[in-house]
Image (tube, rainbow, N blue to C red):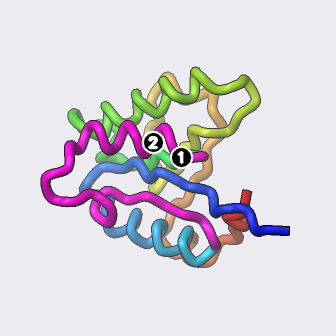
Amino acid sequence: MADSPPLKVFLCHASEDKPIVRELFERLQADGFAPWLDSEALLPGQDRDLEIQKVMRQSGAVIVCFSSVSVSKEGYVQKEIKYAQDIQKEKPEETIFFIPLQLEECEMPFSLRGIQNYCAICASRIKTSSMPSGKK
């Protein structure tokens, strides 16, 4: 019996949160997932919008990292969040695809208040918390 491929996980975040999101990326890799992080995967000359849309559609899950910065910042992070929400709407009702992750205590966007989120208040919890295997 062949091993199933690791679950591809897109990491959506504000650029200001990159240090803690990089820790999450490393933790997911260590736990057998296939995380996708823009700074690790985008190549010079690639069309950022096109590549992110393509990779997000190919992913089994999108972890949307929320912080006081990301919830109040205008720009690309908001565009990514809305795109992930649009993909979630195309999935069957019980599918878990859009996973909110609070990096710190912050006000969640109104449109997401009904979605159960994981709250990781301090960075050390990313390193030490128990996570399921990345195998499908």
Residue 50 is a magenta residue: yes
Q: Which residue is mark 2?
A: 56
Are circles 1 and 2 on residues that touch, CB within 8 Å?
A: yes
Is residue 13 depicted above or below 126 in this figure? above
Residue type at mark 2: give it.
Met
Q: Nearer the viewer, residue 3 or 30?
A: 3
Expressed as whole percent of the image width and height from the top left, the position of residue 126 reads: 55, 70
**Residue at (72, 67) in percent of width and height:** 133
46 on left or right of 77:
left
Find the magenta span and give its range: 32-60
26 on left or right of 3:
left
**Residue at (73, 62) in percent of width and height:** 4
SS at mark 2 in the image: helix
Q: Residues within 10 Å of mark 1 (few under 14, many from 20)?
A: some
Q: Which residue is mark 1?
A: 59
Q: Residues within 10 Å of mark 2 (few under 14, many from 20)?
A: many
Residue 72 is a magenta residue: no
**Residue at (25, 54) in percent of width and height:** 15
Is residue 111 depicted above or below 101 in this figure? above
Expressed as whole percent of the image width and height from the top left, the position of residue 26 reads: 47, 74
Is residue 115 depicted above or below 119 in this figure? above
Q: Residue furthest right?
A: 1
